Amino acid sequence: MTINTLLNHLLKYAEKNQILQPDDRDYAINQLLYLFSLQSFIPENIHEDLDFFQLLEALIDYAMKNKLISDDSESTCDNFEAKMMDSFLPRPSEMNRLFYQHYKDGPKVATDYFYHISQATNYIKTNRIKKNISYKYQGKYGSLDITINLSKPEKDPKTIALVNNNKTDNYPACALCMENVGFYGTSEKAARSNHRVISMTLNHEKNEWGFQYSPYSYYNEHCIILKKNHEPMRVDHNTFKELIDFINKFPHYLIGSNAGLPIVGGSILSHYHFQGGRFDFPIEKAKVLQHFKKRHVEVEILDWPLSVIRLTGNNEFNLLDMVIAIFESWKQYSNASLGIHSETTEKHNTITPIVKLKDGKYQFYIVLRNNLTTSERPYGLFHPRDEYFHIKKENIGLIEVMGLAVLPGRLKSELDLIKKCMIENLDFAQFPDLEKHLIWINEIKDKAMNEIDIDSFLKQEVGKVFELVLEDCGVFKAKDYKSFEHFVLKAIE
Ligand SMILES: [Zn+2]
């Protein structure tokens, strides 16, 4: 297929998916001609539909063969592809106008529209996300969602070599900064030519907020709400108001914030942001251990590996008062016999807050967190123990707290290798990749021998470790339930 035919296919795709308006057609063609170093374009009648991802591959292939891009690393190809798709996208201000035009027909109409655009331009990497392995684990707390993340590009040696030769400065300042919008991308900074952020007002801060989707969605319509200004993560009374305000504006979404402290926070502590989406998380189905009603708010203690209090009510101010009361009590709470110290040389208590509407009422989840480290537990007393690091080492953030594990992609090949060793009776110790799993393998291998389906057995065992990982992050363990209940009763007095 000639490059002219390929571009005709791309234009047909863009028109069909409504990312190209008739008035913008010539403009888009000329953007593409420049990008592909071509002098002219001949319209062709395209009858058959080409698969979009095959089409992208063919176009990138052409760019490579004609030396329009310097190498075949994933980042170089992604940068070129994003620029190609940007030929169709509205400018940021026009994107905002279109979003709010759709919003007049309802918040869901607006997010549906923006989500569609984000997918159709391959800003959201749908074909890579499909590679993820997702399954459910049935455990003590009901079902947990497990995802082995194979979609996010792992830095290959080629990319690392490029990074070393190419010391970039600090622009964009971080992955969440507004200055990413339209950024071409480098070997280490993501392609953002096709990136758009919708301006938002939260908690009376006019247009000081941005809304975007995550390119590597961990769940349906995984979005990020960020402060336009680059300022550090925090959890305070304003955070709660901001979260509730978002739910008032987008009642079909859930939203939550990572804690603002290291160890118990997410991976980006430098830029204030929330994560949202349209998804039902396992935590919502948790059993209720205890139920109270105070000042028109229902207060529930949930049967969950972490210490979770759920508040339900239809008056946001009553709810907010109760959230603040519990948050302030928790910040001061210490219990030496449980290892909970609110303060040493610094403050250790915070919460992971999550809000969703359920049957027209606000549901506010307060997850109690503490980031104290001790000499025995240098990674954190309420952090996964190092014996579980072979499955999950990273901080347990908002998404995990809600019962969705995002596990490293290496696990797929490692589990395959464990299975192969079990079936062929090979020595696990001869494989360096399995070294970190050896103790765990010894614990489970006898049981595995009696299993017909080793794959699903191993997946369930991984789920079991994730459940233990979450329990490690709980500040009140199951045996300390009385102390937990006592804390809640005092806090809501
Ligand atoms: Zn930033």
Image (tube, rainbow, N blue to C red):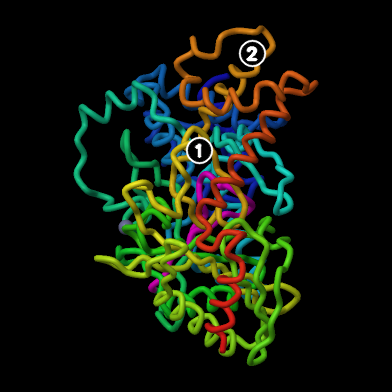
Q: Which sits in the foreground, 18 or 129? A: 129
The 10 Å Cα crowd at callout 1, few under 14, some 14 to 19, many 20 or more, is some
Name the spot of residue 347 as percent of width and height, x first. Answer: 32, 68
- Which residue lies at the image location 63% right of the left edge and 42% below the top edge? 146
Whole-percent x, y for residue 217 in the image: 56, 47
Residue at screen point 49% across, 9% down? 430
Q: In which quarter of the image is the C terminus?
A: bottom right
Tag 1: residue type? Answer: Tyr
Q: In which quarter of the image is the N terminus?
A: top right
Q: Which amino acid does label 2 sit on?
A: Lys
Considering only vertical position in the picture, is 379 above or below 79?
below
Query: N-terminal of the two: label 2 or label 1?
Result: 1
Residue 209 shown in magenta: yes
At x 58%, y 24%, the residue is 441
Tell me, for residue 420, which label it has, or none.
2
Q: Distance between the residues labelled 2 and 1?
A: 22 Å
Mark 2 Cα-neighbour bin, 10 Å: few <14, some 14–19, many ≥20: some
Label 2 element class: helix
Per the rendered image, the range of residues in magenta is 208-225
Query: In front: 76, or 266?
Result: 266
Of the numbered discs in the image, which one, if any, rests on residue 445? none
Residue 16 magenta-drawn? no
Residue 145 showing in the rendered view: yes
The quarter of the rendering in which ligand 1 is drawn is bottom left
**In this image, 106 relative to 260: left or right?**
right
Can you identify the residue that label 1 sits on? 388
Ligand 1 is within 8 Å of the C-beta of the residue at disc 2: no
Residue 94 visible somewhere in the drawing: no
Extreme residue in the right direction? 452
- Residue 319, horizontal then vertical, whole percent: 59, 84
Q: In which quarter of the image is residue 393?
A: top left
